[in-house]
Image (cartoon, coloured by chain):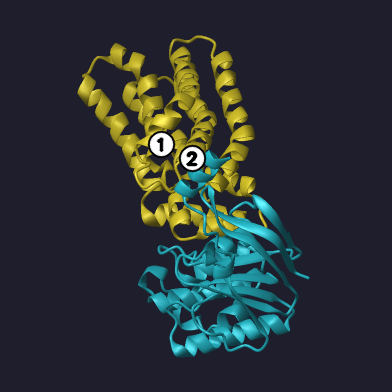
Amino acid sequence: MISILKRDILLSVRSGTGFSLSLSFFLLMIIFAPLAIGPDDLLLKKIAPGILWLSALLSCLLSIDHIFQSDFEDGSLEALIIAPIPLESTILIKTFAHWVTSGLLIALIAPLIGVLYNFDFNSLLWIFLSLLVGTPGLSMIGVFGASLTIGLKKGGLLLPVLIMPFYTPTLIFGSQTIMRAVDGLEVTSTFLLMAGITALVIALMPFAATKAVKASLK
Amino acid sequence: MILSVENLYCFRGEFPILTQISFDLDYGQIISLHGPNGSGKTTLLKTLAQIIPTEKGKIINNSLETCLMGHENCLKFDLTVFENLKFWAGIYKNPSINSDISILDLVQILNIPVRQLSAGQKRKVSLARLLISKSKLWLLDEPDASLDEDNKKLLNKIMVNHLIENGAIVIATHTTIDIKNVLPIDITRFKNDKNTSIDQFVDGFNK
């Protein structure tokens, strides 16, 4: 399983479809939003949590359709199905690799960029925590969506349409966590709800994705 | 018996393209599947590998691991030959791949990205995956495609060694195989003549 993790991270770095694409898109969104909105400090602080989470979500989405596509095209997916590793584990580890090259990097870089929006230390901490705990859920939901569109030549538009509804709870509770931290309110309830959603999708979706992958190769 | 097939139906989508296939394959035996393009050789191999689920009939596979070599080479173009083989060694839990690399004479191209290899070289690297898998049952779909005469002989030698080591092979090919005691199966005799949607519609209407 470590070999799948290593290979997917290496491919993401070399091919430029994951790591650099997600991160640069996120940075561009976060840096350019204040320029577009203007120097209104109060307004920026109010909408920044939403911008942060929306950028993180779109960045994750950007690289998700590659997750099975190249394995499908070069025959690796069929070989992995009959390999002596359960497909559920393969899917879980591929999700983890996707998260390392997108969500984890975003969670690490977001507090640094948050300084642009003049956040205090407590808010920056919750930005980091909410993205660290919420983005694995985004990757898992994305992988499930990608498993439904394997082999579709023009599945690019279908994928976001399919998975956006599943992203909504994480988006709401993730941005609410930061908003409440900025306002100095109690944040654990929204944070735990988001963590619960992440745990739920990680527990269930590998099985659903396995069924979808097998069905798509039928 | 490593593989036993009884009354197997092979489906492409919703339709059975091959029907009532039965054969047994013992350790050390090789079966070659013959038939024109589109006759269902690949579909049968994928069904035997259980990538396509068995909807009708029975497959008993006593091999702990099965390795399928399809039309695609299962290689990542952005990785080197060594990185690709190391990945598959990790999947098949094979700690040492050096002997497999030397059998196929891949030492010279180990550090070259797969993107820069010729079609024949890629096929040879794909053959190394078979050896790395240590599987007893090999399902090969035109493995000699793109290989030159020398490498076809090498492939033949590898298959003979596999059979001597009590492995078994099902191979789909358009060429004759230079191995003793090959069991040829012409799969056109299992072809389902009524496999179109119109036939199914008419059948359903008649019922």
Q: Earlier in the sequence, mark 1 or mark 2?
A: 2
* Relative depth, front residue between B82 and B179: B179
- Report whether mark 1 lies on the same chain as mark 2: yes
Residue marked by disc 2: A148
In the rendered view, would you say A2 is above or below B191? above
Q: Secondary structure at mark 2?
A: helix
Please say if A82 is above or below B167: above
**Which disc is residue B162 wearing?**
none
Q: Nearer the viewer, residue A1 or A84?
A: A84
Q: Is residue A50 above or below residue A17?
A: above
Colour chain B is painted in: cyan
- Which residue is outermost to the front? B206
Q: Residue at x 41, y 26 (%)?
A: A53
Badge 2: chain ID: A
Res. A159 mark: 1
**Which chain is home to disc 1?**
A
**Residues at circles 1 and 2 in contact by the CB criterion of under 8 Å:** yes
In percent of width and height, residue A196 lies at 61, 23
Chain coloured yellow in the rendered structure: A
Q: Secondary structure at mark 1?
A: helix
Query: Is B4 displayed left or right of B130 in the figure?
Result: right
**Quadrant, the C terminus of chain B:** top right
How would you rate the neighbour count of disc 1 (Cα within 10 Å): few for under 14, some for 14-19, many for 20 or more?
Answer: many
Amino acid at pointer 1:
Leu
Residue at mark 1 to residue at mark 2: CA–CA distance: 8 Å
